[in-house]
C-alpha cells in the first residue's frame, strides 16, 4: 500500500459527521485570529463604539469565517469535507451577501466612507478564495493584506472615521502577523496534504542524532500556530474589554 498523507488536513480538522465537517470548515483558530484583528484595529481608535465593533465582527465572521472558507473548500477541497459543491456555493454566497448587507447598513447609518471597505471585502473574498485572475491574488502578500491589514484597518475606521498613524500602524502590524501565520501554515499544509514520506537525521554537536519524520517537522509548526491563535485572540479581546 502506498504511503498516505498525515491523517488530517489541519490540526483543528475533525471527522465523522456533518457537524465535524462544519466545525472544520470554519477554521476555528484562524477565524478567531482574524476576527481579533478587527478588535485590535478598533481599540486603536480614539473612541470605541460597541455597536459598530459588534457589527464589524459579525460581518467579518460571515465573510471570512463562513463565506471565504466555503468558497475555498469549493475551489479545490483542501479540507476534504463531505459538503456538496452546491451546498458550499450557497453557503458561501449567502454568507457574503449577509456580510455585505451589514456593510450597507453601516454605509447608510454611519458613513459613506465605508463603501470602499464593503466593496473590497466582497471582492477579495471571492477573488482570493476562488483564485480568480489566474491565482494572482492568492499569494502571501495578498493574504497579509486581505486577512490581516484589511480587517484591522476596517475595525479602526468604523470607529474613528478618519485617518491617523495609530490606525495605520496597527493595520501594518496585523499584516505582519498574517505573514508570520502564512510562513508557518504553508509548510504545515504541505506536510499534511501533499507529503507521503519524509525521512532524515539531524546530527547535533554533542554526537547525538534525532530522526526526522513528517510528524517531528510538523509539530513545532502546528504548535506555533496554535499558540499564536490563542495569544492574539486573548490579547485583542482583552484590550477590547478594557476599552468598552
Image: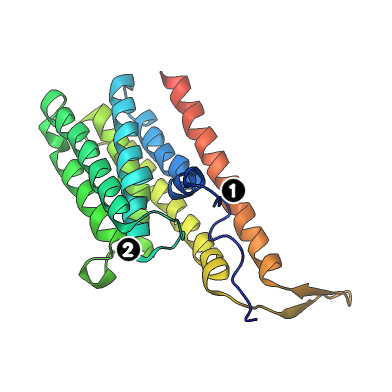
The image quarter in which residue 117 lies: top left
Residue 75 numbered mark, or none? 2
Along the line of sight, the residue nearer the viewer: 213 or 41: 213
Q: Residue 36 carries which label?
A: none
x%, y% of residue 131?
28, 65
Q: For the residues carrying marks 1 and 2, which lies nearer the camera in this image?
A: 2
Closest to the observer: 232 or 57?
A: 57
The residue nearer to you, when weighing 75 against 30, is: 75
The residue sitting at the top extreme is: 244
Q: Please state the horizontal and vertical placement of residue 3, each as a whole percent of the image.
A: 63, 78
Tell me: 139 left or right of 184: left
Q: Residues within 10 Å of mark 2 (few under 14, many from 20)?
A: some
- What's the residue at 35%, 56% (across, down)? 84
Residue in view at x 33 percent, y 20 percent: 50
Quadrant in the picture for the N terminus: bottom right
Cα separation, mark 1 vs mark 2, equals 25 Å
Q: Is residue 227 above or below residue 52?
A: below
User: Is residue 170 or residue 228 the one in the foreground?
Assistant: 228
For label 1, the SS is helix
Give the x, y percent position of residue 38: 36, 37
Amino acid at each position: 500500500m502506498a504511503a498516505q498523507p498525515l491523517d488530517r488536513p489541519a490540526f483543528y480538522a475533525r471527522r465523522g459527521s456533518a457537524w465535524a465537517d462544519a466545525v472544520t470548515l470554519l477554521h476555528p483558530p484562524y477565524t478567531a485570529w482574524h476576527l481579533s484583528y478587527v478588535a485590535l484595529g478598533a481599540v486603536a481608535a480614539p473612541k470605541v463604539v460597541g455597536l459598530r465593533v459588534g457589527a464589524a465582527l459579525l460581518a467579518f465572521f460571515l465573510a471570512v469565517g463562513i463565506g471565504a472558507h466555503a468558497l475555498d473548500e469549493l475551489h479545490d477541497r483542501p479540507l476534504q469535507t463531505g459538503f456538496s459543491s452546491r451546498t458550499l456555493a450557497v453557503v458561501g454566497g449567502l454568507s457574503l451577501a449577509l456580510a455585505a448587507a451589514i456593510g450597507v447598513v453601516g454605509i447608510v447609518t454611519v458613513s459613506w466612507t465605508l463603501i470602499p471597505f464593503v466593496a473590497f471585502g466582497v471582492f477579495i473574498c471571492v477573488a482570493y478564495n476562488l483564485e480568480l485572475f489566474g491565482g494572482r491574488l492568492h499569494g502571501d502578500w495578498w493574504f497579509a493584506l486581505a486577512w490581516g491589514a484589511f480587517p484591522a484597518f476596517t475595525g479602526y475606521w468604523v470607529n474613528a472615521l478618519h485617518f491617523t498613524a495609530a490606525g495605520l500602524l496597527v493595520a501594518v502590524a496585523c499584516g505582519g502577523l498574517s505573514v508570520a501565520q502564512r510562513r508557518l501554515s504553508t509548510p504545515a499544509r504541505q506536510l499534511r496534504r501533499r507529503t507521503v514520506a519524509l525521512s532524515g537525521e539531524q546530527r547535533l554537536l554533542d554526537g547525538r542524532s534525532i530522526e526526522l519524520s513528517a510528524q517531528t517537522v510538523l509539530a513545532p509548526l502546528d504548535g506555533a500556530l496554535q499558540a499564536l491563535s490563542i495569544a492574539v485572540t486573548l490579547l485583542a479581546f482583552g484590550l477590547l474589554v478594557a476599552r468598552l
